[in-house]
Image (spheres, rainbow, N blue to C red):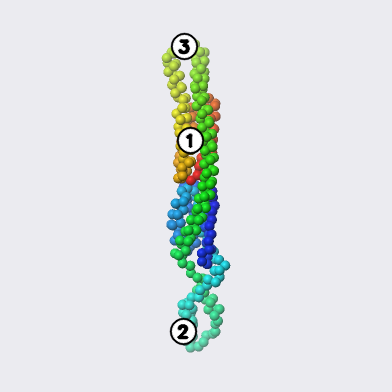
Amino acid sequence: MTAFAGAEREIGLWAFSWEIRSVNHRYLDIALRLPDSFRFLEAEVRNRIGKSVKRGHLDVTLMQKKTPSSESGLELDTTLLKKLLAATEEIEASANQTLGHFNALELLRWPGVLRESDTDREQLAPMLLELLGEAMDKIVTVRSNEGAQLAELVETRCLKMREHLADVRQRMPEVLAALRQKILARLSEVTARPDPDRLEQELVYLAQKLDVAEELDRLDAHIAETLKTLRQKEPSGRRLDFLLQEMNREANTLGSKSADSETTRASVELKVLIEQMREQIQNIE
């Protein structure tokens, strides 16, 4: 299900933001991007996302940048500075002469003497996970709203399918009667007279072969189960996908048994509606 959400917060000298993008997928697939210093959070982040979302491809990114106040967050490594000064004194003592003068700025340029304040990653972890929760709440809300709209579209198509099934069921006695009259009319043109009992048996067999009541009943049952599933609170995308496969199978059988053009047309319309629903079902968790 397509959706986007984000959440930002300044924590200490840093500004953190989560961005989550969601698109359709048959299963839950998480693409996670974390700064190297926070990769230890990966397992917990995946676990928390999995508790909120069961289906879809999610691009999840944590971004970290300095705040304006971070410029003052510089620390002097006094230990390194003392070692550096001691080393210069030792060199001069070994050379038995003063090698030259240097100022404080040159010392500050030495790698590691001046550094940014260290951030306690473990201390930040709970706040980053809390911020992730805010982003997940937003994206779940967006997905829920979209899911409600999709459910309404699927329900509308289910009701349209019921109309086609009712038309086919109403026409079946007329179709079978017309088929019987057609066969009898052709037999009247034949010189030889068939055995009446055998003819009746063949007509009954043909009527049974073309009877689609069972397929119509199963389609009705699948539609009812689909509508029931749409109203459930738990994830239902995979179950709906299975029900649509069964509907498509019954619609194909209905078309293969068709004895008139109207039933064939109804079968085609049913398959069109099922395919439209299948496309929408891929978006439903």
Residue 280 in view of the camera = no
What secondary structure is marked by label 2?
A: helix
Residue 260, image x, y percentages: 53, 25
Check disc 1 and report its element: helix, strand or loop. Answer: helix
Identity, as a three-letter code, of the amino acid under mark 1? Ile
Check disc 1: other Cα within 10 Å, few if <14, some if 14-19, many if 20+. Answer: many
Say if 158 sits above or below 196 in the image: below
Is tag 3's residue or tag 2's residue first in the polypeptide sequence? 2
Using the numbered discs, state the Cα–Cα distance from disc 3 to disc 2 in whole angstroms: 128 Å
In 3D space, how far apart are the residues under numbered discs 3 and 1 (Cα atoms)? 47 Å
Cβ atoms under marks 3 and 2 closer than 8 Å: no
Q: Earlier in the sequence, mark 3 or mark 1?
A: 3
* Disc marking residue 90: 2
| Residue where numbered disc 3 is placed | 193
Q: Is residue 117 above or below residue 240?
A: below
Q: Position of residue 170 (x, y in %)?
A: 51, 25
Task: Please name which of the two marks, 1 or 2, marks the residue nearer to the observer.
Answer: 1
Residue 149, horizontal then vertical, whole percent: 54, 43
Disc 2 marks which amino acid?
A: Glu
